[in-house]
Amino acid sequence: MQVNTNVLNSSETICALATQPGGAIGVIRVSGSKAIEIVDSIFSRSILNVPANTLHYGEILDREHQTIDEVVVSIWRAPHSYTGEDSVEISCHGSSYILEQILHRLIENNCRQAKPGEYTQRAYLNGKMDLSQTEAVADLISSTNKASYKLALSQLKGHFSSELSLLRRQLLKINSLLELELDFSDHEELEFADRTELINLAEEIDNKVTSLALSFKTGQALKNGIPVAIIGKTNVGKSTLLNCLLHDNRAIVSDIHGTTRDVIEDTIGINGVDFHFIDTAGIRKTTDYVEQLGIERTLATLKKAHIILWVIDKEPTENEKNEILNQCADKHLILVHNKVDDLNNSTNQQNNISISNQLNKYTYHEISISGKYNLGINELETLIYEVADLPEISENTTIVTNARHYDVLTRAHASLIRVQEAMAMNLGGDLISEDLKDTISILAEITGDQITPQETLHNIFKHFCIGK
């Protein structure tokens, strides 16, 4: 892997706090060519010649050789460390004062405060991981649910990189055969590359690239939470339903129409996946300006939602049906019959028939609940998860979650289309070869197998925490 070694001065030794202050234990990470030597200069016992992967108990001393804290020092020697450099971790008490004093002593002895993501950036520059794996580190740290954790772990383990490497090897094979033909262009009778076979292989590679790009929508939903809008007329029990789903009185509930005037949002996990619930203002005709704004926001929210819970407690009018159904044509729709505890409620009797007839041309699900008595809520949660139609997530699953990767795959697809068109037109091998090289180069941007611009690295690592 070729890297831009001018991105940072890797000869400098860096230090940073790797844990949140205020806990029982704090960890300070030191990395660089002089990491062991610098820690040795402030430690109560010599660690210059100790074996790698060992722990050492002692004291960190101030300039007057007074004890700052009793600590345990962990030693890693290059290249067998996270960064690929000599590294030391100092485990001490979590006092903010103690941590500041130890960091101050390290900086006094020619250590530099690490920049955000600099440890992981050094791991990339030293060949410990490729660029997509370094991005997975940030995703793993920020993962908030089981699904996003598994996707990040899969990428960190290199499954995504392996798929890309296979695609690039296949492209290199095609390009090598074409260039071999060019080398023997004087012998027209020689054909090293069967064009039909190459077209089929290029199409197969493009299908895989396209499939990865299309997975980005699912990846974003799993990473950021699947948006679910709760809609319906005023006073049908939308806010009560939200409170039931959240197991908390998040939204104000009242018999007064128009109580919810703005969008209320919160997130819960269902089967390891985050669902982002949005309680919207009730849809009705009103002269109240503030309530009108809330209804406008409701309609805007519908466009962003993947799943819509349409809550009803009686038969909607034809205009209401048309208005809602037109908004839900490309969404996963669940019709929620609320207030089944109300014996006078006719929603669950003959009125269901006309609604179902109206919905015949739509793919939808329906369920009956009582928000007031918390009936059917567990079944609704199960239905919401099923309707989301998510793929089975494991540590080996490859789903694109990164916008940069999606952009690269989209450009690679466009380049592969040019390759296939050139082959179909039986253009010269030199022209096809150039497009193939372009595709190979584009895919390499994801893993950073070629020299990566400093600006790209800066944009990737600037969002990392300082200790990573």
Image: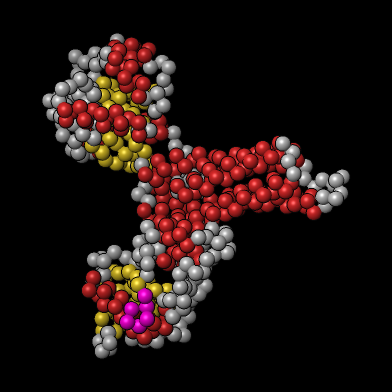
For image coordinates 35% across by 61% down, the residue present is 465
Residue 232 is at least partly visible in this image: yes
Task: Where is residue 234? Give x, y as percent.
Answer: 20, 24
Residue 110 shown in magenta: yes
Task: Where is residue 339? Give x, y as percent.
Answer: 22, 22
Tell me which corner region of the image, top left, top right, bottom left or bottom right, holds residue 94.
bottom left
Left or right, residue 395 beside residue 303: right
447 lies above or below 2: above
Task: Where is residue 194? Give x, y as percent.
Answer: 77, 42
Left or right, residue 207 beside residue 91: right
- Judging from the image, the colouring scheme is secondary structure
Left or right, residue 212 beside residue 18: right
In what quadrant of the picture does the N terminus appear? bottom right
Residue 65 shown in magenta: no
Left or right, residue 140 beside residue 347: right
Task: Where is residue 343? Give x, y as percent.
Answer: 20, 16
261 lies above or below 358: below
In what quadrant of the picture does the C terminus appear? bottom left
Tell me which corner region of the image, top left, top right, bottom left or bottom right, holds residue 115.
bottom left
182 lies above or below 55: above
For image coordinates 35% across by 34% down, the residue present is 304
Residue 236 is at least partly visible in this image: no
Magenta residues, start to end: 107-112
For image coordinates 42% across by 67% down, the residue present is 119
